[in-house]
Amino acid sequence: MNTTAYVIVHGGAGLHSKNSEPEVKQALQLACTETLARISAAGTNFPTALDFVEHAITYLENCPLLNAGHGSNLTLSGTVECDASIMDGRTGDFGSIGAVSGIKNPIRLARAILEHARIPDPLGRIPPLTLVSHGARLFAEQLPPDIKAELLVPPETLITSRATKTWESWKSRLAGISAANTESSTEHDDMELESLQDTVGAVAFTSAAANSGSIACGVSSGGILLKHPGRVGEAAVFGAGCWARAPSNVEAEGEGVVLERTRKRAKFGIACSVSGAGEYIVRANLARAIVDALNSASPSSASSAEEEEEEDVDVHAILQRVLTEEFWLPNRSPTNPDPSAGVVLLTTAKDNDGEVVRLWCVFTTPSMAIAYASSRYPQGKALILRRPKSVESQANDRPRIFATGIAL
């Protein structure tokens, strides 16, 4: 693999118990290391960031511990309905699926929708960004036979015994079973519900000269437990669950045109993947809000050297501000006193020594599970990040947001 690659994954923001920590960390770390190894073994000289995102999330979807693909939370009807999306930061191409059943790897179907939109339609029709439910499955049935055979599975095969047990417990509460039958298991079930509630996702960057460096992001989720059938969460919504943008001096693949989506041209690349309370994340269009805020603050490529020195970007402060002003404050209410969200963010920039790649993580919940690896550090590392006591001890009427950065 003649490229430098970075891949970061997350297993959701929420409350991760000490008991489940080793298994979750191992799953996330393997998603990174197996992705690097698989793409390298495939002999692809110039893989794109989309390839890394798709492979990493596919691994997470196959892990029964996580709320995506096999192991997803069950709907009110006791079925699995998945959402997923993927985005190319160089071209802006996007594909997603929502509320779909019987798809082993939803992120692969989202990628297929993205790739389909790149092919000119003979009648000039506008290709879809998002397909849902029955329509998404019909699209999968029209894919090449080898891909279709891998994606289409009996819907019940995605249901795990763990998900069924959790669903039965909470369905009983919803049905009004006496408190005496549920109090004894409340602490355990609360912990399990929180840890299985969130989206998984990935962001990636490659610096291969052949594709001028590419950056991408993706998310996949089984949605909230006991959701109404047909509910679509942030993992399927354009701008909500993931967003990516390449530096404006990076050319779109095969087009030879400079991406210039705003008047102020960002000098660094950004990829973002989000987890948490879907409806609130959708209202905030959170992933895009974060990337746009960082893009607006980044030094202009047309700035003089003196101006660039004065325009140092405080990513930590921007993440804190966006999570507070665009997400936490607008969505807080008496019935939702502490809106939950978690974000992994990858930023790239050039300096005199070459490419500088950095991982950022910010969340409003007690913890967030992440892992990262690179072609320079292929063994990877997994972490359960937890809010420090100084943040946890703050009053409930203040946003308890924790943000941190890691140089890769």
Image (cartoon, rainbow, N blue to C red):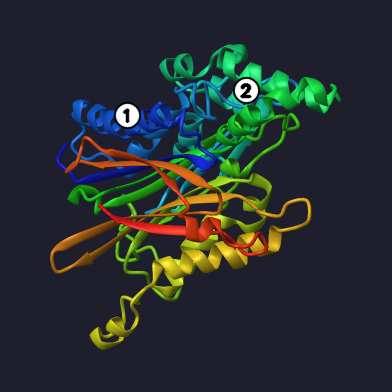
> Residue sitting at 54 percent across and 55 percent down?
392
Rendered image quadrant of residue 346: bottom left
Mark before the other along the chain sequence, 1 or 2: 1
Disc marking residue 101: 2
Q: Label 1: few (<14), some or many (≥20) within 10 Å?
A: many
- Would residue 128 be seen by someone viewing this image from the given angle? no
- Would residue 242 be seen by someone viewing this image from the given angle? yes
Rendered image quadrant of residue 298: bottom left
Tell me residue 297's x, y (percent).
42, 74
Q: Quadrant of the N terminus?
A: top left
| 274 lies left or right of 384 | right
Marks 1 and 2 close (CB-CB < 8 Å): no
Q: Is residue 128 above or below residue 329?
A: above
Tell me residue 389's x, y (percent).
48, 56
Q: Label 2: few (<14), some or many (≥20) within 10 Å?
A: many
> Residue sitting at 65 percent across and 35 percent down?
224
> Residue sitting at 44 percent across and 75 percent down?
263
Q: Is residue 163 above or below residue 262?
A: above
In front: mark 1 or mark 2?
Answer: 1
Q: Quick one: SS at disc 2?
A: loop
Residue type at numbered disc 2? Ser
Rendered image quadrant of residue 250: bottom left
Residue tagged 1: 30
Residue type at numbered disc 1? Leu
Query: CA separation, marks 1 and 2?
Result: 26 Å
| 62 lies left or right of 160 | left
